[in-house]
């Protein structure tokens, strides 16, 4: 089988380019919108257009089906799309809302209802909910989309089939991974540990904290216009420097990260905003249960038996609503306090790490099975 893809970036590799028995043909340089986007984004300072349209003549190869990520395919060939938020994906205008895109949404929706669109794969139940909400004022269109949509969480390779018991004499090793350090919750992690240490609620010899992320990534898109004062980042870095138990890396190769996770005890992702949470799957596959917040897909992939969930009220898009500096600060305080409670409980009852670790491995094995995912894709392609 030959499957055409519009790119081979990380999302495609995690959700589409997943089967060694399939030949994938990359149309990145044969996509009209690759060049339109280059012109728009680099020179005209316009937003990216999430469309795929093969150049004339480029489809002569025997492509059985196109499979795109977050895009709509403009083609007469069969096609499938996987999406993490919504389709059509149209970025709202600055200082505007999604409603300002209503005319574009309606115009592009005809491609979704066409017979050659075989399936729309929602990456999570949250994405499915957002897609249905997008067209809740168009009952007939919603019905057609509902018939085409399936929820398929991405596959995940297992790195460990059973987590061995940890040495009780070792410090509990926590690991955070997030290039966007502050958006992913790195600042709140450092604050939580710093407050626990300052009040002697926990002691330095009890823990080890590895932080992997770019400390210069201080902008947080979840905050909109309500960004942190630079003092927050300065205090975060000062706390990291104050305690030897923190080990910070700006980046780390993936193979080294996976080896680290197989030795660590607890993962950390108290993120402010997340379209999915692939790092949670990677941690779980290594027998490393995770502390997360509850945005988007995280409650679906981090159930209580396999990890720890910090829950706050969500808006209709399964996100946090930050509409003022007070909202931001109040939500941060609640996240830090909840994280402190979880960390203290883990230190007092470290036996729970082993139980949740093996539950995490079991859910990866059943809910993110690679072979089962490959079979489901092939079935969709064969419609």
Image: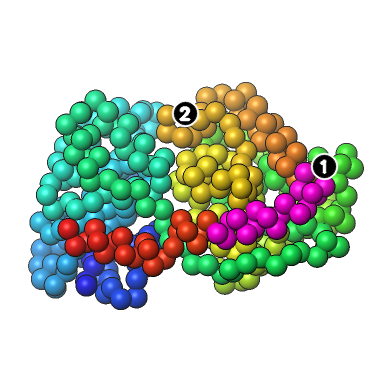
Front residue (pair 197, 265)? 265
| Quadrant in which residue 303 is drawn | top right
Mark 2 or mark 1: name the one nearer the start of the chain: 1
> Which quadrant would residue 96 be assigned to in this image?
top left
- The secondary structure type at the circle numbered 1 is helix
User: Compared with residue 39, is residue 323 higher up or lower down, i.e. above or below?
Assistant: above
Q: Residue at x 82, y 47 (%)?
A: 348
Is 263 placed left or right of 373 in the picture? right
Q: CA distance from mark 2 to mark 1?
A: 31 Å
In this figure, which residue is indicated by the disc labeled 1? 196
Q: Is residue 74 visible?
A: yes
Does 210 appear in magenta? no
Residue 126, by quadrant, is: top left
Observer-nearest of 256 and 356: 356
Q: Is residue 329 left or right of residue 131?
A: right
Magenta region, main secondary structure: helix
The reply to whether residue 45 is in sight is: no
Q: Quadrant of the C terminus?
A: bottom left
Looking at this view, is 127 or 58 the one in front? 127
Residue at the image position 28 percent from the left and 57 percent from the top: 68
Magenta extent: 345-362
Residue 85 screen position, x and y as percent: 37, 43
Residue 244 coordinates in the image, percent (x, y): 83, 58
Quadrant occupied by the N terminus: bottom left
- What residue is drawn where x is 85% and y is 55%? 206
List the residue tagged with mark 2: 315
List x then y, in percent, for residue 179: 57, 55
Q: Is residue 350 magenta?
A: yes
């Amino acid at each position: 089988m030959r499957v055409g893809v519009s790119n081979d970036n990380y999302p495609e590799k995690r959700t589409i380019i997943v089967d060694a028995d399939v030949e994938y043909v990359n149309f990145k340089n044969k996509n009209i919108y690759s060049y339109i986007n280059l012109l728009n984004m680099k020179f005209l300072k316009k937003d990216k257009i999430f469309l795929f349209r093969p150049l004339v003549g480029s489809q002569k190869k025997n492509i059985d089906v196109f499979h795109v990520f977050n895009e709509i395919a403009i083609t007469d060939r069969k096609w499938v799309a996987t999406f993490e938020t919504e389709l059509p994906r149209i970025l709202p205008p600055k200082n505007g809302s999604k409603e300002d895109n209503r005319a574009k949404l309606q115009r592009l929706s005809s491609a979704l209802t066409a017979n050659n669109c075989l399936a729309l794969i929602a990456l999570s139940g949250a994405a499915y909910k957002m897609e249905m909400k997008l067209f809740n004022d168009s009952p007939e269109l919603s019905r057609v989309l509902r018939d085409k949509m399936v929820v398929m969480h991405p596959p995940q390779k297992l790195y460990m089939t059973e987590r061995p018991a940890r040495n009780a004499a070792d410090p509990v090793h926590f690991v955070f991974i997030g290039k966007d350090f502050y958006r992913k919750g790195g600042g709140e992690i450092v604050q939580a540990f710093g407050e626990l240490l300052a009040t002697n609620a926990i002691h330095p010899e009890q823990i080890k904290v590895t932080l992997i992320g770019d400390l210069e990534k201080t902008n947080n898109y979840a905050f909109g216009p309500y960004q942190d004062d630079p003092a927050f980042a300065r205090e975060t870095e000062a706390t990291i420097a104050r305690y030897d138990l923190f080990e910070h890396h700006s980046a780390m190769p993936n193979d080294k990260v996976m080896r680290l996770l197989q030795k660590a005890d607890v993962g950390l992702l108290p993120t402010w905003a997340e379209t999915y949470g692939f790092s949670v799957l990677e941690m779980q596959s290594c027998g490393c249960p995770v502390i997360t917040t509850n945005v988007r897909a995280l409650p679906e992939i981090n159930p209580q038996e396999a990890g720890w969930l910090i829950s706050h009220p969500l808006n209709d898009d399964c996100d946090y609503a930050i509409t003022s500096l007070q909202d931001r600060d109040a939500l941060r305080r609640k996240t830090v306090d909840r994280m402190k409670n979880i960390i203290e409980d883990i230190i007092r009852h470290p036996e729970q790490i082993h139980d949740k670790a093996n539950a995490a491995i079991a859910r990866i094995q059943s809910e993110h099975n690679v072979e089962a995912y490959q079979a489901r894709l092939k079935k969709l392609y064969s419609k």
